[in-house]
Image (spheres, rainbow, N blue to C red):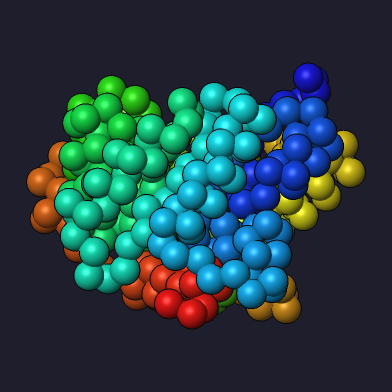
Amino acid sequence: MPANRPRTKILLDGGDPAETLRVKNALGFLDGQTTNPTLVAKNPEIQHLIASGHKLSRKDQENEYKHIVQQISPLVGDAGVSIEVFADLDTTAEQMLAQGEEMFSWIPNAYIKYPCTREGLRAAGESARRGIRVNVTLCFSQEQAAAVYAVTKGAREPVYVSPFLGRLDDRGENGIDVVRNIKKMYERGDGHIHVLAASLRRLEHLLASFALNAELATVPAKILEQWAAQGLPMPDENFRYEAVDAEGRSLKPIPYRDIELNAPWRSFDIRHELTTKGIERFVNDYLNTLAPAA
Ligand code: G3P
């Protein structure tokens, strides 16, 4: 066990059990894993099946996903394995919930990922009431995070909310600000939500997530291996996050907003263009890569 293990739980963002094992060995620990339709579609076994001309039905796809998370499950610690429901823009909460219940039975340490939409939040709220652990994904704003808080209030298990900071950076906004703002907003809450920094693109994102005391961070293998190769550095008191993109251009700050956390969840404006785009991307990757002949 490394002496300087961070307080932030470290999850691998991936869909390949061999990679999970490799990263766990490099770090000496691994608290959890997140998966999503894009990452599962990149799984080497699935890629091999597709390359050899196999046509996967939805049921085959589901079985492959189940097989993948069942291999990952025993490799990780108590932050669990997040499994994402298949949802397009028309999927209802009831349809997501049915998938979520089934997926939750696959492994003992599952978290079910629902998108941060009206229907996704309805499914997340109902799941939390039924004792299904939840991770609300594709979150891009403080207002969305407030709705996640409100709809899952009373959950018996910690609920994860995943702000995708890299995708905000991609369009010139400082994604780290959203993590900071959500953490600040939740200071007035009851602690039932854990912030899972997601869509990390570089080591500085990870160090900034530590500095902000994010409860969890999900990180691609490449960055975790880079972190391990440098001896698992932690930010010290002089650490300053430089809000610039890969070309060194300044990222636009995202200001904090004073939001009443205890308002009814439906009163929050949860629309976000990147949530919609994110769902569309997952659907495309899932359908195009896993079922090219469907
Ligand atoms: O866990 C979130 C992540 O998989 C999304 O990352 O790099 O596609 O924005 P990215």
- How far across and how far down the image is residue 215, in percent? 51, 34
Q: Which residue is drawn at 12% across and 45% down?
A: 263
Can the viewer see residue 264?
yes
Q: Which residue is drawn at 33% across and 62% down?
A: 87
Q: In the picture, residue 144 is in which quadrant?
A: bottom left
Tell me if 83 is positioned left or right of 23 in this view: left
Tell me if 145 is positioned left or right of 53 in this view: left
- How far across and how far down the image is residue 171, in percent? 52, 77
Rendered view: 199 above or below 133 = below
- How far across and how far down the image is residue 253, in percent? 48, 66
- How far across and how far down the image is residue 261, in percent? 21, 42
Nearest the camera: 186 or 288? 288
Q: In which quarter of the image is the N terminus?
A: top right
Q: In the picture, residue 246 is in which quadrant?
A: bottom right
Nearest the camera: 17 or 250? 17
Rendered view: 268 above or below 186 = below
Can the viewer see residue 239?
no
Q: Residue at x 64, y 44 (%)?
A: 12
Nearest the camera: 72 or 181? 72
Labels in figure, total: 0
Q: Quadrant of the C terminus?
A: bottom left
Q: Residue at x 37, y 29 (%)?
A: 158
